[in-house]
């Protein structure tokens, strides 16, 4: 996948995660965006080689919550 394709994919993946953060964390969009973009998870998600982009928005949101609570997240098992 080239860089433009990956950027387009991120533009599709990130908004639902932000929506979950705002709905479940009682923060506005700007704060949710800022917090998510500063997370380790986002840094890793933004690296195509991590392959995190193939997980669902809910899975990525859960991983983000784990990072907030513990500073760490596990990679889900593939089924």
Image (spheres, rainbow, N blue to C red):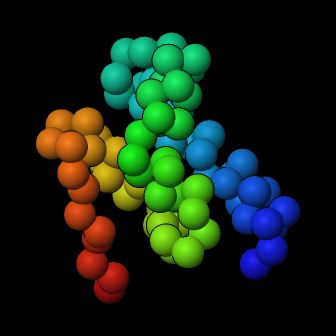
Tell me where residue 35 appears, x and y as whole percent. Answer: 45, 28
Q: Residue furthest bottom?
A: 79
The answer to whether residue 58 of the structure is visible from this angle is no
Q: Is 73 above or below relative to 1?
A: above
Q: Nearer the viewer, residue 28 or 33?
A: 33
Q: Quadrant of the N terminus?
A: bottom right
Tell me where residue 36 appears, x and y as whole percent. Answer: 47, 35
Q: Residue at x 34, y 23 (%)?
A: 25
Tell me where residue 47 appears, x and y as whole percent. Answer: 57, 63
The answer to whether residue 44 of the structure is visible from this angle is yes
Q: Nearer the viewer, residue 31 or 57?
A: 31
Q: Residue at x 32, y 52 (%)?
A: 63
Q: Residue at x 32, y 85 (%)?
A: 79
Q: Residue furthest right?
A: 4
Q: Is 6 above or below relative to 1?
A: above
Instruction: Tell me the quarter of the picture where residue 75 sits.
Output: bottom left
Q: How many marks?
A: 0
Q: Residue furthest left?
A: 70
Tell me where residue 59 appears, x and y as whole percent. Answer: 38, 58
Q: Is 15 above or below relative to 9?
A: above
In the displayed structure, does residue 19 sit left or right of residue 12?
left
Q: Residue at x 35, y 45 (%)?
A: 64
Q: Nearer the viewer, residue 41 or 78?
A: 41
In the displayed structure, does residue 8 sit left or right of residue 16?
right
Q: Is 11 above or below relative to 22?
A: below
């Amino acid at each position: 996948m080239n860089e433009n394709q990956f950027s387009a994919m991120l533009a599709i993946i990130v908004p639902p995660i932000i929506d979950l953060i705002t709905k479940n964390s009682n923060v506005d969009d700007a704060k949710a965006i800022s917090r998510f973009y500063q997370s380790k998870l986002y840094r890793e998600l933004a690296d195509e080689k991590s392959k995190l982009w193939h997980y669902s928005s809910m899975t990525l949101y859960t991983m983000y919550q784990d990072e907030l609570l513990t500073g760490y997240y596990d990679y889900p098992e593939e089924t």
